[in-house]
């Protein structure tokens, strides 16, 4: 194999965020930009010569071009085998499973998750390690440091690979295997859930459903599992063909962007169950007829009912949530007398806990839940979990949710996103909040007395690593919270996320509208951070 060493110049903006490096497509199309970052990853790793690398993405614009580039760089750097999803496609949870199942050294996943796709939109790339999970901070930090000084990359002189023909070939000692992107994942789901019960519940008409794939990666997975394997009608999956621009959709599974599904679920003709997933298939939105289930509640309900699912029938070793996620799952853990861990946002922080057997289920408020079956959040897994739960309990989604609130109380919760805030303004907001922290404990705001105010710092209970500056927390004596955090998932400016939570034990008050119940906390959050005043905006861009 002929190897070329190409001289390059470093870029100073290749610091991976929460889930890898995300930029506009045009940024990745700059000379050497993608090549530099991939080479920086390989330069920072050891021991991969002759080993397997998994490669796939969500099918967004630039996916196929990027994969061909990465194949050549991986070949030149000495990988022995490349395992690639047919058409360059692999959902993020499926990629995690493939890495684990075949004992790969790691994998590169090409996605910008729930961000829009297209020539003028977003692209992303992240590296997953051998346990199938995202690279930890020590690795992503090394990638960034290497990218700042990189002066060359290696590439193999070879023809483009046919990504559409399933099978294996060998090119000058490099084995390239194109796999069906769905098969391994579908088999895994069949081993976790009661497919016979689901088939019977769907065929009898007890469960009717609608799944919105948002013209993204989960379309083929949903069609195979929900329609072909479980017997749901063909029209149960909408927007089921992956498109490079997601059909113009913003593939973020929330009530605002999955509006077609939302309109159906709140109509007179709503099916029993509705769900959506995102660009790369790791997020989920759960709805029932006339009800939306917040991700925080979904995690708590899953934890409380996991024993009804075949794979978790023996109980849970523990649960974990990201810091901004509501404390609903904490109450379940306390009732079941199992550990509950609070981690920073980012699935990589759950990986150590999962590998150590400390937790079985985990989740975050940003529409992500998962378990020890992979090392990523998993959208379709969550959908099947809820379907299995409905079939087993013989209750509607609304009845399951309301019964849960009656037992544990309701954590009334919402998130306000201010997107594309100019970076200097966003940083000044956080700096001003930091300055207020020492003075807040003990202060009284209406019925709310501040119990603590801090900037979340996480010490990993497995490896002892420390993660600082993970969000501003303000907790109140009555269990309510306000959390401020800058998100690392956007590509323009910064997204300020404000999380608001009020615990309500009184069942007669459980059906309040969240925006009304949280109105005082919403006003207090603005008083503390002044995002509207500083940006001139009158409302959040997205409320979830």
Image: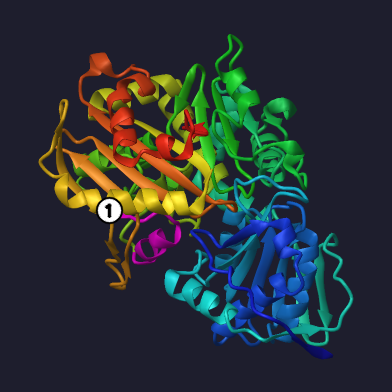
Question: What residue is pinned by disc 1?
Answer: 434
Q: Quadrant of the N terminus?
A: bottom right
For residue 109, above or below residue 231 = below
For residue 427, above or below residue 476 = below
Boundaries of the magenta span = 341-356
Expressed as whole percent of the image width and height from the top left, the position of residue 542 reads: 51, 33
Instruction: Residue 212: name its quadrant.
Output: top right
Residue 268 appears in the figure: yes
In the picture provided, is 145 more to the left or to the right than 361?
Answer: right
Quick one: label 1, few (<14), some, or many (20+) residues within 10 Å? some
Q: Residue at x 59, y 51 (%)?
A: 492
In the picture provided, is 442 more to the left or to the right than 173?
Answer: left
Expressed as whole percent of the image width and height from the top left, the position of residue 106 reads: 58, 72
For residue 235, above or below residue 128 = above
Residue sitting at the far top: 268
Q: Residue at x 21, y 42 (%)?
A: 475
Expressed as whole percent of the image width and height from the top left, the position of residue 186 reads: 63, 49
Give whichever of 85, 437 is nearer the camera: 437
Q: Residue at x 30, y 66 (%)?
A: 460
């Amino acid at each position: 194999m002929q190897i070329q060493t190409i001289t390059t110049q470093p870029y100073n903006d290749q610091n991976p965020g929460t889930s890898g490096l995300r930029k506009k497509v045009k940024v990745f199309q700059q000379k050497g930009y993608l090549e530099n970052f991939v080479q920086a990853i390989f330069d920072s790793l050891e021991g991969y010569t002759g080993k397997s690398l998994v490669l796939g993405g969500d099918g967004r614009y630039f996916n196929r071009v990027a994969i061909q580039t990465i194949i050549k760089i991986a070949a030149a750097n000495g990988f022995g085998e490349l395992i690639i999803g047919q058409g360059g496609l692999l959902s993020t949870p499926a990629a995690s499973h493939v890495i684990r199942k075949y004992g790969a050294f790691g994998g590169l996943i090409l996605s910008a998750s729930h961000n829009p796709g297209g020539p003028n939109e977003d692209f992303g790339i992240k590296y997953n390690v051998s346990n199938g999970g995202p690279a930890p901070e020590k690795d992503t930090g090394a990638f960034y440091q290497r990218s700042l000084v990189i002066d060359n990359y290696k590439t193999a002189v070879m023809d483009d690979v046919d990504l559409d023909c399933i099978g294996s070939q060998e090119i000058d000692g490099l084995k390239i295997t194109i796999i069906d992107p769905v098969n391994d994942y579908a088999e895994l789901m069949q081993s976790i859930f009661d497919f016979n019960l689901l088939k019977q519940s769907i065929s009898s008409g007890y469960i009717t459903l609608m799944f919105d794939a948002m013209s993204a990666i989960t379309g083929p997975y949903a069609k195979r599992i929900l329609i072909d394997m479980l017997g749901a009608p063909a029209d149960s999956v909408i927007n089921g063909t992956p498109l490079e621009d997601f059909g113009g959709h913003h593939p973020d599974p929330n009530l605002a962007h999955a509006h077609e599904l939302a309109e159906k679920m709140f109509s007179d003709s709503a099916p029993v169950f509705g769900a959506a997933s995102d660009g790369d298939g790791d997020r989920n939105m759960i709805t029932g007829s006339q009800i939306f289930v917040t991700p925080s509640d979904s995690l708590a309900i899953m934890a409380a009912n996991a024993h009804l699912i075949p794979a978790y029938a023996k109980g849970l070793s523990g649960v974990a949530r990201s810091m901004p996620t509501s404390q609903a799952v904490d109450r379940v853990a306390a009732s079941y007398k199992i550990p509950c861990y609070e981690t920073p946002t980012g699935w990589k922080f759950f990986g150590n806990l999962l590998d150590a057997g400390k937790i079985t289920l985990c989740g975050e408020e940003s529409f992500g839940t998962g378990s020890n079956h992979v090392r990523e959040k998993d959208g379709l897994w969550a959908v099947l979990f809820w379907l299995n739960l409905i079939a087993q309990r013989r209750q509607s989604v609304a009845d399951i949710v309301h019964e849960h609130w009656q037992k544990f109380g309701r954590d009334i919760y919402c998130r306000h996103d201010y997107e594309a805030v100019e970076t200097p303004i966003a940083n000044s907001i956080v700096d001003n909040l930091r300055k207020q922290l020492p003075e807040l404990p003990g202060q009284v705001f209406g019925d709310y007395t501040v119990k603590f105010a801090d900037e979340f710092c996480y010490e990993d209970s497995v490896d002892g690593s420390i993660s600082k500056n993970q969000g501003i927390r303000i907790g109140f004596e009555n269990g309510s919270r306000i959390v401020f955090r800058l998100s690392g998932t956007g590509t323009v400016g910064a997204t300020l996320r404000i999380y608001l939570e009020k615990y309500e034990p009184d069942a007669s008050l459980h059906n309040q509208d969240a925006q009304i119940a949280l109105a005082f906390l919403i006003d207090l959050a603005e008083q503390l951070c002044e995002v509207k005043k500083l940006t001139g905006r009158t409302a959040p861009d997205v409320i979830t």
